[in-house]
Image: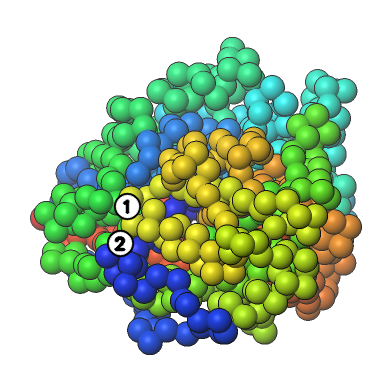
Amino acid sequence: MKTKKVLAGTVAVLSLSALALTGCSNSKSSSSSSSSKTTKATLPVAYKNTATAKKGGTLKVGVVSDSAFKGIFASELSDDAIDSEVGQFAQQSLFKYDDNYKFVKGGAADISFDDSAKTATIKINKKVKWSNGLPLTAKDVEYAYEIIANPASKSNRYTDSLKNIKGMEEYHAGKSDTISGITMPDKYTVVLHFKQMTPGMQTSGSGYIWENAEPYEYLKDVPFSKLQSSDKVRKNPVTYGPYKFSKLVQGESAEFVPNTYYWGKKPSLSKITIETVSTSTAGAALKSKKYDIMLDEPASVYGQNKKPKGYTMVGKAELAYSYMGFKVGKYDSKTGKNVEDKNAKMNNKSLRQAMAYALNVEQVSNKFGYGLRTRATSLIPAAFKEYKNTALKGFPQNIKKANSLLDKAGYKKGKDGYRKTPSGKKLVVHLAAMSGSANQEAIMKNYIQCWKKIGIKAQLTNGRLLDFNNFYDKVENDTKDIDVFFGAWSLSSEPSPADLYSEGAPYNFTRFVSKKNNQYLKNIDSQKAVTNHKWRVKQFKEWQAYMNNQAYVVPIQDYYDAYPVKNSVKGFTLQTSKGYTLWENVSLTK
């Protein structure tokens, strides 16, 4: 299962007709509650099928998406959640982990740490081979770091976390041809040398350890600048997971067959197919039993099919959340830093907080989340129970408070009912949001109406919703036609937020930068946090309160995942420790 931070698409959808009935509350005071509050979903994490498994067979998988997947099957170059879903049958991380995501032995490689020497040693299992028959070697592990750090590859994975490896910054700047902090004592050993040890290092998804490798011998003739568009990455990827790619229809579907060189248990299935299915047809596909498993099922489809005939629903709290972000700067690719513009339109805390308090997120979640979506209260989702600041209330809808914030900040209303900036200029906020169907359009129209209630005039960027790829292309490149945007994060299994919100994080899409934020993020991943866990938890909770106060990134919803699994499927589970070898153990019954 996923252990890395990736961009997530729109997951929450509403019924267009039902939304027209509720709309945005007309209340001039707090209206955060709803008369139709739903119970949070509680589903089993696995389906126990006691029937006898048959040999072979084709597993049909549907992944719900209204956009074509990019089809970049190199984790160093892709940050698309759908690419991860599609490639998971063939792609496998280096290290195995337990139910708490702590590294354990038994993976394609094992990793050990020496705090005093500030090193991590990776020992590759000599049985592991790529799907072209070549062995997985130390160079393949080191090459993955080079792809990330080489500026020509334009990887968004080059973050402050990986700069902790000695020599990474020098290599990135072109001052060195190699990464000095990555040594290879022999063909199957890699030693990483760090500037400092961090508390999350021994947990999968920390960001300080890259957990993938790339086939150097297969890709070495492709320039870094051409890797992302190369057929070797997009059409004929070489992997070392239980299955290998056998057919790809760009952006639409993929077919997999067993990898004859796989180092682990021989897979049971003779073929796996996966294809995208639109949100508008997902319900019908489920009713017709078109797929054996459906991934990324929208809440609305679950709400209408909580007990689909012939399926068992499994689920768990997702490491993910949606958010509203305010653009206040640019990312400088030359310096590798976010640069905040103090004069940006959205760089007024009262304006941001008011826009957050105006939204009827709880009403939307209660009526249309079907137990899978709940209003988020901070930028650490509920799945991370230990680190979550449960004292925070987030931004429950409060129209009176929103109006008061704007009045005191000098945003006066004109004759048309819309507010002007404190300097007297017309205020028009350009909103970017992803498409998901007519229902998603209804959500955004609802929010625009909420803002109208407090005198904020908002317009959709380009006058419409944007597809997944176009949306993130604009957000990542800081185009001038976006002031506020709604995004989502599928998180890694280590809760450190540094790779999303630090000064050097390309994923810090708002471009907010402050000394206090930098210090909190450094504290969370500091040497002190390695030996003082309680202090680290305290830093997490204070950071959440600080980010809510600043409101550059406003939490919207926490997610709970539901997977329809056909009753003829055996071995499917969401248990964390079994995710590493999941697909080699999935079969079909007689």
* Position of the C terminus by quadrant: bottom left
Q: Is residue 39 above or below residue 65?
A: below
Residue 22 lies left or right of residue 127; in this view the side is left
**Which element type, helix, strand or loop, lies under badge 1?**
helix
Question: Can residue 91 be seen from the camera position used here?
Answer: no
Residue in front for this viewpoint, 389 or 261: 389
**Which element type, helix, strand or loop, lies under badge 2?**
helix
| Among numbered discs 2 and 1, the one appearing first in the sequence | 2
Q: Residue at x 61, y 44 (%)?
A: 482
Disc 2 residue crowd, few under 14, some 14–19, many 20+, Cα 10 Å: some
Give the amino acid type for the residue marked by disc 2 in the picture. Answer: Leu
Q: Is residue 378 above or below residue 339?
A: below
Q: What label does residue 16 carry, if any?
A: 2
- Asked if the residue at tag 1 contacts the one at tag 2, i.e. Cβ–Cβ closer than 8 Å, the answer is yes
Give the labeled residue for mark 1. Answer: 438
Q: Is residue 437 above or below residue 258?
A: below
